[in-house]
Amino acid sequence: MIASLSSAAAVARLGLCAALAAALLVAPAEAQVGPPVKLAPLADSETPAGEQPAGALDAATAQQGAPSDATQEGRVEVERLAAIDPSSVGLLDQSNGGFGLEMWRGTRRSLVERLLPRLPMGMLSPPMQDLARRLLLSTARVPDGEQGGQSLLGLRIERLAAGGETVAVNDLLRLTPARLTDRAFARARLDGLLLAGNHAGACAEFKSLVADDPDETYWLKGLTFCKALNGERAAARFAVDLLQELGERGDAAFFALVESLNGATEAQVASLLDPDALHLAMLQVAQLPVPDDALPGAPPSILRAIAKAPNASLELRLAAAEQAEAAGALSAAELAEIYKSVIFEPEQIASSQTIAEREPGPRANALLYQAGQLRSDPAERARALQLAWRLARQHGGFGTQARVNREVALSLGPDESLIWFAEDAVRALIAADEIAAALEWFNLAQAAASRSDTAAGAVLHLWPLIYVAAPSYADAWDPKLASLWWKGLESLDVPDEERQRKVALVFTLLHALGYEVPAAEWERLFAAPLTVTAYVPSPPLRHALLAAVKGGRVAETVLLSLLVLGDGGPAGADANVLSDVVSALRAVDLGVEARAIALEAALAKGV
């Protein structure tokens, strides 16, 4: 490793790293207090990696071929067994959501190695989360070409860990050959141990990694924590000095935590802008609170940990839990349990709507959730849900509130006495992927439209969502419906610019999904501005997507589609970008996924 570094600074850095590693590995304990304490049980999903189940590489083995004997002029020739690339392993095949063994056929390995590290993770888009997870977990032959850097398996594990897919990471690590070493594997395994409270296991890993890979400062920082945890104060202080010599001065929280663990009672951590698993473990052992500014820079796995951290304030735990659910790192059921743990007085439940409107936020969401659960009158339960959803549409987190309140919404079956609730119910049920239940409410509104202005308005507002959400409606499509819908919008008291924006988006999504929109209706939109200001992907990225679609390269199309949408997801994408992505996914037989992307965009953009 040292031979690969040419500069004097790099060599000096490695020399210091090696010195630190050697010192820490042999330093005597100043006050040995016994082995590190395991503060929480190790979850089933955090079984140490390296034990490979039988058949784990069956798919990869099949792709490489088996040895064969061939008799030729009385001579037996034995073909050599091709080497198995461990990056082929995965957890999904075509029977459970994988994209298939041939998903990278025709794709260059160099392209995947360049773009996969930039795959957005933790995005607030369930369809994108699903596509990314399946892309990273599929068992598949590796793309053509030589390995240029880090293994593809390492890249996949790093991205899964970034997305908070802790269980999947650990399951995938168990399929990794014991001989294979990769920093991404080690970091994922260590973070899982730290977040599970298994400090003894983590410290054993840190010690081994420092010996084998001393120039990775995260291992050195981890071993410093272990020395402080074990009462070896002199070794911990020595480690801090050397880490600072290595330029690791920016992590003020880490150094304050080492001081605290070394007995400095005045040491505090007032700010933690980029928290990681080591920070959280040290905070918990030091019995210090998680700083209030820890959430903006936290990846999904850390958001999940903060949501369940006993040393985080209730307000911080609630906010972290909502963000973790939106990022796919926490289930709606787990968020519901956190909501249930908040103690409210009966009079607060009774005044939940007034309180929530006055002080919206995570605590108000928990209050409205409990009101929806506890109220016996269906109308009162519906009002609690309606307010929770409307506040979320104003302040963010609509998808989360739709999912966490799903069961209560389903318990309120279509009832004409609740027709005022129909439009909100349809939107929330669609966002919670309960399309059949949403259609029941929509059908009720249609039936009541002739005698209720509220029902008629709901039908007008919901019509585009229904055609985007329900492929069963495609057979009943009539291009004239687009004209009738636009005519209905003109009766509403909304600015022309807003109406034209909505129409343009709806027509774009419908066209991308294969519905015919009359040319005359498109021409009416020429009354609007002919240029727009919006986020658009780079020209080479869009060119690559179109080329991948033309070549029928499934995994490449999925990867590029996710990159084109970016961190902003469907909610932040321009209509033309959405059209490209929806059309691309449909072209490689991912029509369900294309529809989900279109539907999320429609919901997020106020259709």
Image: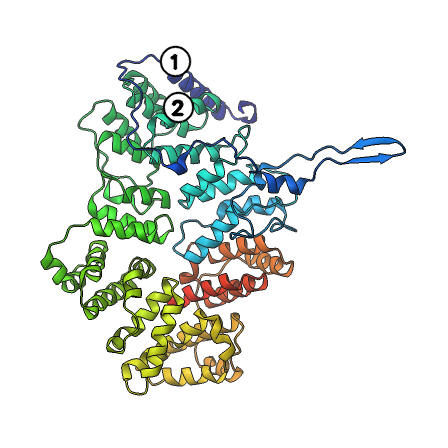
Residue 590 position by quadrant: bottom right
Q: Position of residue 25 (x, y in %)?
A: 40, 17
Q: Amino acid at mark 1?
A: Val
Q: CA distance from mark 2 to mark 1?
A: 14 Å
Please tell me which of labels 2 and 1 falls first in the chain.
Answer: 1
According to the image, label 1 marks what residue? 26
Q: Secondary structure at mark 1?
A: helix
Quadrant of the snapshot with the C terminus: bottom left
Q: Residue at x 34, y 36 (%)?
A: 195
Q: Nearer the viewer, residue 348 or 516?
A: 348
Q: Residues within 10 Å of mark 1 (few under 14, many from 20)?
A: few
- Left or right: where 260 falls relative to 543: left
User: Viewed as shown, does residue 5 lie left or right of 328?
Assistant: right
* Residue behind mark 2: 204
Q: Secondary structure at mark 2?
A: helix
* Depicted 368 relative to depicted 184: above or below: below
Seen at 29% across and 28% down, the residue is 255
Nearest to the eye among marks 2 and 1: give it. Answer: 2
